[in-house]
Every structure is written in structure tokens, then in C-alpha cells.
């Protein structure tokens, strides 16, 4: 049964009248797109390995009906062979250079829509987005980790926000003094 016949009979991609091979192919396409979206190491369409200096084209890699009948399009990093032609030409344009990823510096070509025109940061994958915002958050929280040790009164940078001592030795000294005060 072809895909057009399935749609004429009212069945979706998850319908039971779909050929098993087509079901597996759709599922594998979805998994490949999600893997590429997480870390831009493979093309979300063909599965080819992407080099670290190779430009990434964010395009629709998988579209179809989900498990509950809702239609979804998944954008994932694609290689130059799988990207639409207009996107490849835009990436090669000299007048308007494509933006680069905020973490790895890879060229990212995408179709800006809606709020994307005001986008400040562009990322090639979820891993780079997480790394950027984790780094930014830890830099903003660095001032809360500047402490003075309660045992030796030396300044130190704490690994956790609630640390009170600069070393396990100072922690032990403070424990022993508390223990002596409690016993006396």
C-alpha cells in the first residue's frame, strides 16, 4: 500500500494499515533527526557525518504525524547535499555572511521566521545551546562563590554556593572546636 493510498483511506503514519517497512523508515527518520538536533555530528536527513568546519543548514529533516495524531515538523542540522538549494546559495553569499554558532564557531544557515529576526545568538545544535547558557549562568553566579573561610579566615572560591570552608582540613578544625564547646 502506497502512502497516497493510506492517506485516501484516512490512515495516518501511525495507522495500523501502514506497511511495516514504511513505519520503520519513518521512525528511523525521526530518530536520526533527533540525534542530529542534539549534537550536530550527523546530517538529520541522510545520516552522513558532518565535519567540525562544515557549515550546518537548519532545515526540516522529518515531518509527519506523531503518536497521538498531531502533525509535527522537526528542524535538524543538514549537510549541503540535503539542504534546499536556496539555503545553500544564501550560505555562500558574500554580501550577507551567515551567522556562526555561539560556541563552536560553525557557520549556521537557517530560515529566520517571526522572532528569529531578533535572535541574538545562533546555535548549530542543542548541545552548543546548553553549553552556552550553562557557561553564562556559571559566570553570572561566580560572585556568589567568592567566600571567606570560617576556620582560617582566608578568601577562597567555593565550588558550591553554600560552602563555608576552603578545605576538608578547615572543615575538620571547625568540627572539633564545635565538639569541644558542646562537651564543655
Image (cartoon, rainbow, N blue to C red):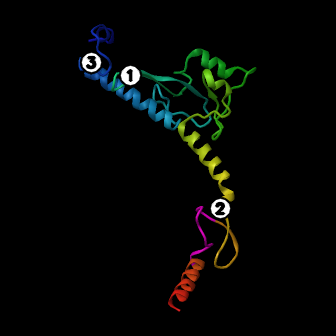
Label 1: how many Cα within 10 Å (few below 14, some 14–19, many 20+)? few
Residue 109, given in percent of the width and then of the height, sits at: 62, 25
- Is residue 85 shown to the viewer in this render? yes
Q: In terms of secondary structure, where does tag 1 sit?
A: loop
Which picture quadrant has residue 10? top left
Q: Image point 27% across, 19% down: which residue?
A: 15
Q: Image point 58% across, 83% down: which residue?
A: 173
Q: Image point 72% across, 25% down: which residue?
A: 97
Label 2: how many Cα within 10 Å (few below 14, some 14–19, many 20+)? some
Q: Main secondary structure of the magenta part?
A: loop
Highlighted range, magenta: 158-168
Q: Image point 56% across, 26% down: which residue?
A: 58
| Residue at which label 2 appears | 145
| Residue at which label 1 appears | 70
Which mark, by number, is residue 18? 3
Q: In terms of secondary structure, where does tag 2 sit?
A: helix
Between 70 and 59, the one lying in front of the other is 70
Residue pushed farthest left?
17
Residue 2, given in percent of the width and then of the height, sits at: 30, 11
Amino acid at each position: 500500500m502506497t502512502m497516497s493510498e493510506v492517506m485516501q483511506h484516512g490512515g495516518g503514519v501511525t495507522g495500523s494499515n501502514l506497511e511495516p517497512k514504511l513505519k520503520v523508515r519513518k521512525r528511523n527518520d525521526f530518530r536520526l533527526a533527533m540525534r542530529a538536533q542534539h549534537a550536530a555530528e550527523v546530517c538529520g536527513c541522510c545520516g552522513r557525518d558532518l565535519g567540525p568546519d562544515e557549515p550546518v543548514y537548519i532545515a526540516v529533516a522529518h515531518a509527519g504525524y506523531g503518536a497521538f495524531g498531531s502533525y509535527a515538523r522537526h528542524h535538524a542540522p543538514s549537510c549541503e547535499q540535503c539542504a534546499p538549494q536556496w539555503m545553500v546559495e544564501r550560505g555562500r553569499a558574500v554580501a550577507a555572511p551567515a551567522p556562526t554558532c555561539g560556541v563552536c564557531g560553525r557557520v549556521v544557515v537557517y530560515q529566520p521566521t517571526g522572532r528569529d529576526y531578533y535572535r541574538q545568538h545562533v546555535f548549530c545544535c542543542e548541545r552548543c545551546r546548553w553549553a552556552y547558557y550553562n557557561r553564562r549562568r556559571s559566570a553570572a553566579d561566580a560572585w556568589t562563590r567568592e567566600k571567606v573561610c570560617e576556620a582560617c579566615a582566608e578568601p577562597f572560591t567555593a565550588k558550591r554556593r553554600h560552602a563555608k570552608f576552603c578545605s576538608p582540613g578547615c572543615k575538620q578544625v571547625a568540627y572539633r572546636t564545635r565538639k569541644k564547646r558542646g562537651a564543655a
